[in-house]
Amino acid sequence: MNLLVKELIQPLLNFNLNELEDYEMKYWAIYADIFDTLKKDPNKIYNILKNKLTGEHLKALEYFYNEYFLRPEKLMENCGCMHTQQPINFRSALASLTKYMIDQGYNITPLPKVKIINNDIENADNILGKTAYYDPSSCSITLYTLNRHPKDVLRSYSHEMIHRIQDNEERLNNVNTTNTNKDSNLQDLEKEAYLNGNMIFRNWEDSIKNK
């Protein structure tokens, strides 16, 4: 397959992550209780809460009300974001996994910015290419998604969230290399991320499948 053809058809083969917005993931992960409250009586509760809430809570209220209750078709498409429900797309799964971590008490806030790279063909063709990484300097997680199953990307996200925890605990300050063979401290940090990241992902998955 030549490069031009690959670039033209790849978006049809790949799951779509371009619509993911950081603020949406944050609202679903932290303020999903506002969404649940609105469901009881959207218009009445919105009018009550808009005069009581401030800051991020008010922004979340406006987001949920405008996106899902003024536009009911979106409610049917995207509302499966609570971690006790089956996610219906990557966006809802990412928010669900994040909310699960918060509900389990993991120290991941403030939430990192999530960057999606789904068009790096050279990286995708490289057997040892990048899958994801956490950047402490910008508090961000970058996910490479081209030619990957969404579940595999979510597992990478869970791994990088352990590095977010390590950053919050100020345990990444002395890491000066990416070579685990040269730094025993880095090797221990990566062991923790692989073990805990995979187990958190599995626990989250089991919490949905075995309600």
Image (spheres, helix red, strand yellow):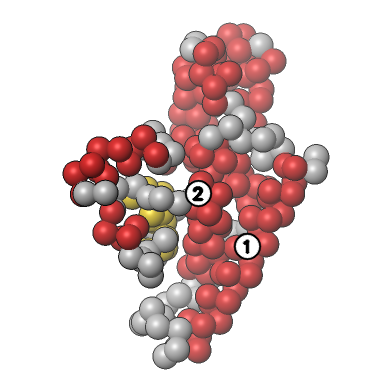
Residue 69 visible (yes or no): yes
Q: Is residue 130 above or below residue 25?
A: below
Residue at point 51%, 46% (across, down): 150
Write down the quadrant of residue 99 in the picture.
top right
Q: Name the secondary structure under disc 2.
A: loop
Q: Mark 1 to mark 2: distance in Å?
A: 16 Å
Query: Which x, y percent locates residue 106?
Result: 63, 58
Give whichever of 72, 120 is nearer the camera.
Answer: 120
From the viewer's perspective, is residue 86 above or below residue 166? above
Residue nearest the observer in this picture, 46 or 124: 124
Question: Which residue reaches farthest front?
Answer: 1
Residue drawn at (40%, 83%), measured in percent from left and top? Answer: 179
Residue 21 appears in the rendering: no
The image quarter in which residue 41 lies: top right
Residue type highlighted by circle 2: His
Total numbered circles: 2
**Left/right of residue 166 with respect to residue 176 in the rendered view:** right
Quadrant, the C terminus: top right
**Local secondary structure at mark 1:** helix
The image's mark for residue 105 is none
Reading the image, the residue beneath label 2 is 149
> In the visual, does 127 lie left or right of 110?
left
How many residues crowd around disc 2 within 10 Å: few (fewer than 14), some, or many (20 or more)? few
Mark identifier at residue 198: 1
Q: Position of residue 75 (x, y in %)?
A: 56, 19
